[in-house]
Image (spheres, helix red, strand yellow):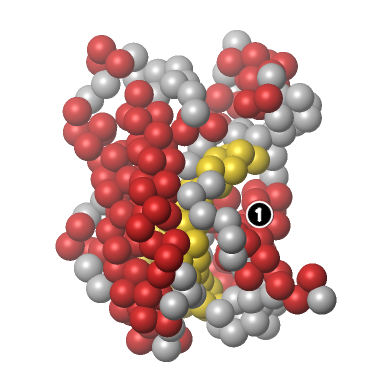
Amino acid sequence: MILDQFRLDGRVALVTGASRGLGQGMARGLAEAGAHIACCSRGGSAEETRQLVEAAGREFLDLKVDLAEPEERKGLVQQVIDRFGRIDILVNNAGGGDRYPPEDYPMEKWMHLVEVHLNAAFDLAQQAAPSMIRRGRGKIINIGSVMSFEGGWRIPAYAAAKHGIAGMTRGLATDWAGKGINVNCIAPGYFDTDMPNALRNDPVRAPQIMDRIPAGRWGQPDEMGGLAVFLASDASNYLHGSVIPIDGGWLSR
């Protein structure tokens, strides 16, 4: 049955930045499809995510890690394997960003953003790959952005990192597809989370953004779940190196 291909019963997913927002929406969807969830966050409470995962009948592991610190990332995937005996799915979602004119962008903030969005994603993919290669299967889902295709406004570091995520996705897919690992990327548009509050409250930019979204609204975090489940499941076994927008039609306009 086709719907059986979407089931994730007994599989284990590590979702970074899953304590809130898009990460929480994907963690919930993966759990409802059958996966146990390891949540990685910098220090915010993941209790709400725990409740959502356990309400779906799945196990939950809360890992407090600052992904901007390479030392803290060491052995992170192994902690998941030690708890659950395996890792099947890695969702590189954690991130954030600041807005500055490029001529004033602080170099320390540039380095921090690229470390979290791009370097940490590659590090964790590299940590997960040996176990996945040994088992001949695995799913890595990188979270890009519509800024994987565009330049944005006053976000040069974010745009650079998200373009990098798209390129990294294609590069890893090229090398690992033949080893049973699917590496793909979700590119969200504007979603109703606490991260873009400054834009939502901007009297100029907010209506400009809404005007350009053909769907006429911002996305909801739970709307990430279906695409995450597809990319984590056997239904996507022949999909490699894709960057898939989920943006209310933003890029089509």
**In this figure, what is the number of numbered marks?**
1
Q: Nearer the viewer, residue 251 or 210?
A: 251
**Residue at position x 36%, y 48% in the image:** 171
The spot of residue 17 in percent (x, y) is 45, 56
The residue tagged 1 is 227
Q: Is 86 positioned to the left or the right of 157 in the image? A: right
Q: Is residue 78 above or below residue 237?
A: below
Residue 44 visible at all: no
Specify the farthest residue to the front: 178
In the picture, the quarter occupied by the N terminus is: bottom right
Label 1 sits on a secondary structure element that is helix
Q: Nearer the viewer, residue 123 or 181?
A: 181
| Mark 1 neighbour density, 10 Å: few (under 14) some (14–19) many (20 or more) | some
Q: Is residue 57 above or below residue 154?
A: below
Q: Amino acid at mark 1?
A: Leu
**Residue at position x 60%, y 76% in the image:** 35
The spot of residue 173 in percent (x, y) is 42, 55
The spot of residue 146 in percent (x, y) is 54, 32
Q: Nearer the viewer, residue 21 or 164?
A: 164
Residue 252 visible at all: yes
Where on the picture, by quarter, is residue 9?
bottom right
**Residue at position x 60%, y 11% in the image:** 204
Q: Is residue 142 above or below residue 59?
A: above
In the picture, the quarter occupied by the C terminus is: top right
**Residue at position x 49%, y 28% in the image:** 149
Specify the farthest residue to the right: 1
